[in-house]
């Protein structure tokens, strides 16, 4: 992280850049009392995830408030504990006016949606210049009982891949892995062949965390050919953990664990600790979202200027190249009926989100301030390496507040970006050619919506216990039977019935 003195000078410069247009406005007859204007602004409380080391620059937040005529009270929660915080608000009926719900947590709130805890916003969207242009297909994917409750944040179908220390590959004269066998060999040598050259055996090949979805396991399992949550076979739904490929993945992870290639405490490790170990050079491979690479590289080079990173998205498995995907939204903003008691206030808050899609606000949230965070050449945005660190710490956290950014025509095109960011974008696009989709996205199972959190925890515990050696294959089979008896068979029946209706 850059020093405090540098940050202070930059902050003063930035404040001047923001103050100048306000002075001009005041000189032209605008309000000379900013406090009065703020008091009359619309107050919006928002619960949002923080995917970066710190919240966005306060100057940027203030500028967004000025442009949108709002007073924003954003509770930034680190992504690693976000689900717990959101669930607490849901259970205690103390949600903010606007709450972001991650795609993976959406089923946790569907019962609350059906219980009338959130506003249905579909009927209002046509009243707004930008919201009426939202993608109908994505809105349908995110709907509940064919009703629209949330404004979606957009993302590619799959950003999953492998982040690797390029300098370690070079030192050990290894090539980028192209298959599961290659990946294993790279991780083994990163563990035992002193890839950092310090003469000590103090590195591991792979660092993981306590997350079977966005950690290592699910991406690795898709390389083995595991279906994405469910697969359709002869007109029937089969959960992923009942497949041979899932067992193959567990056996591979178990081998890494037993051989010391995987961090011993992975089942208890948070995302923050996982990232910290990677940037400090304790591990050479991180499997997850490739778009994290630029930020990881910045932090790693701050500790070791020789650290270099690269990306791989194609790891060939038994069935060729496969990677799991999600629908083209990674979460939704939902609107609490308790915190937003009137239809008028809801419409005002929707107006704020509509305003964030306008050119001035959207580009401020996406790129920051021209001349500080980016430049424009021939009408296109230039994102130089030299300002990458500024964007990571001051601008990028704002991505969590942006809705429908990929499809927003008001956002300027990028003509040049950092090398690793560009590579991540290219490989994410390449993933589109071998996606594994979840066949239940458009299906319905009331029992799944009600019991999935409990039943998923049962399977997650069984998966961890198998990898750690606490249970064997027979023990894992017994846990599957428990899943079936406690509602799993009912879920399968309901999905089968829903699938039959789609035909």
Image (cartoon, rainbow, N blue to C red):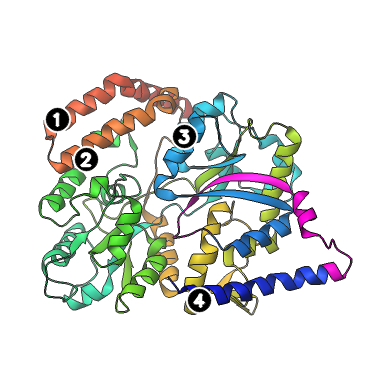
Is 40 part of what is drawn in magenta? yes
User: Mark 1 to mark 4: distance in Å?
Assistant: 58 Å
Residue marked by disc 3? 88
Q: Position of residue 196 (x, y in %)?
A: 19, 74
Residue marked by disc 2? 464
Is 205 part of what is drawn in magenta? no
1 or 4: mark nearer the eye: 4
Contact flag, marks 4 and 3 (Cβ < 8 Å):
no
Q: Earlier in the sequence, mark 4 or mark 2?
A: 4
4 or 3: mark nearer the eye: 4
Q: Which image quadrant is residue 212 in?
A: top left
**Residue range (magenta):** 26-55
Residue 312 appearing in the image: yes
User: Mark 3 to mark 1: distance in Å?
Assistant: 33 Å
Q: Earlier in the sequence, mark 3 or mark 1?
A: 3
Secondary structure under tag 4 reads helix
In the rendered structure, the answer to whether residue 263 lies left or right of residue 389 reads: left
Task: Tell me: residue 330, above or below residue 340.
Answer: below
- The number of discs equals 4
Q: Which image quadrant is residue 261 in?
A: bottom left
């Amino acid at each position: 992280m850059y020093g405090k003195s540098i940050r202070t000078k930059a902050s003063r410069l930035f404040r001047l850049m923001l103050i100048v247009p306000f002075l001009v406005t005041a000189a032209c007859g605008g309000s000379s009392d900013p406090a009065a204007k703020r008091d009359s602004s619309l107050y919006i409380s928002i619960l949002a995830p923080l995917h970066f080391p710190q919240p966005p620059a306060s100057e940027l937040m203030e500028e967004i408030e000025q442009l949108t005529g709002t007073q924003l009270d954003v509770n930034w929660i680190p992504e690693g504990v976000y689900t717990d915080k959101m669930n607490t608000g849901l259970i205690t009926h103390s949600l903010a006016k606007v709450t972001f719900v991650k795609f993976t947590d959406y089923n946790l709130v569907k019962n609350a949606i059906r219980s009338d805890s959130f506003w249905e916003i579909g009927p209002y969207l046509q009243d707004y210049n930008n919201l009426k242009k939202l993608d109908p297909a994505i809105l349908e994917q995110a709907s509940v009982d064919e009703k629209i409750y949330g404004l979606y944040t957009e993302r590619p179908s799959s950003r999953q891949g492998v982040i690797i220390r390029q300098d370690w590959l070079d030192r050990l004269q290894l090539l980028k892995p192209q298959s599961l066998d290659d990946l294993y060999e790279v991780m083994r040598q990163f563990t035992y062949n002193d890839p950092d050259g310090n003469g000590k055996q103090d590195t591991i090949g792979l660092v993981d965390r306590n997350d079977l979805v966005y950690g290592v396991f699910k991406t690795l399992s898709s390389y083995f050919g595991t279906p994405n949550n469910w697969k359709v076979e002869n007109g029937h739904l089969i959960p992923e953990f009942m497949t041979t490929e899932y067992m193959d993945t567990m056996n591979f992870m178990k081998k890494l664990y037993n051989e010391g290639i995987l961090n011993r405490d992975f089942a208890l490790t948070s995302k923050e600790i996982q990232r910290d170990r990677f940037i400090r050079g304790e591990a050479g491979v991180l499997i997850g979202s490739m778009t994290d690479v630029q930020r990881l590289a910045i932090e790693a080079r701050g500790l070791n200027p020789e650290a270099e990173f690269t990306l791989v998205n194609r790891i060939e498995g038994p069935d060729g190249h496969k990677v799991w995907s999600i629908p083209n939204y990674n979460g939704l903003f939902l609107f609490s009926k308790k915190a937003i008691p009137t239809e008028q206030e809801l419409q005002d808050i929707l107006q704020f989100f509509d305003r964030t899609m306008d050119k001035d606000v959207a580009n401020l949230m996406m790129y920051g301030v021209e001349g500080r965070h980016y430049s424009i050449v021939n009408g296109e945005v230039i994102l130089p390496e030299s300002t990458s660190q500024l964007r990571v710490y001051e601008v990028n956290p704002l991505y969590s507040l942006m809705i429908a950014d990929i499809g927003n025509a008001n956002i300027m095109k990028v003509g040049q970006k950092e090398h690793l960011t560009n590579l991540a974008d290219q490989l994410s696009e390449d993933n589109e050619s071998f996606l594994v989709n979840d066949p239940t996205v458009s299906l319905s199972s009331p029992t799944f919506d009600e019991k999935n959190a409990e039943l998923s925890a049962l399977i997650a515990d069984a998966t961890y216990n198998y990898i750690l050696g606490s249970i064997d294959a027979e023990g894992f089979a017994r846990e599957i039977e428990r899943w079936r008896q406690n509602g799993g068979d009912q879920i399968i029946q309901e999905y089968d019935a829903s699938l039959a209706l789609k035909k």
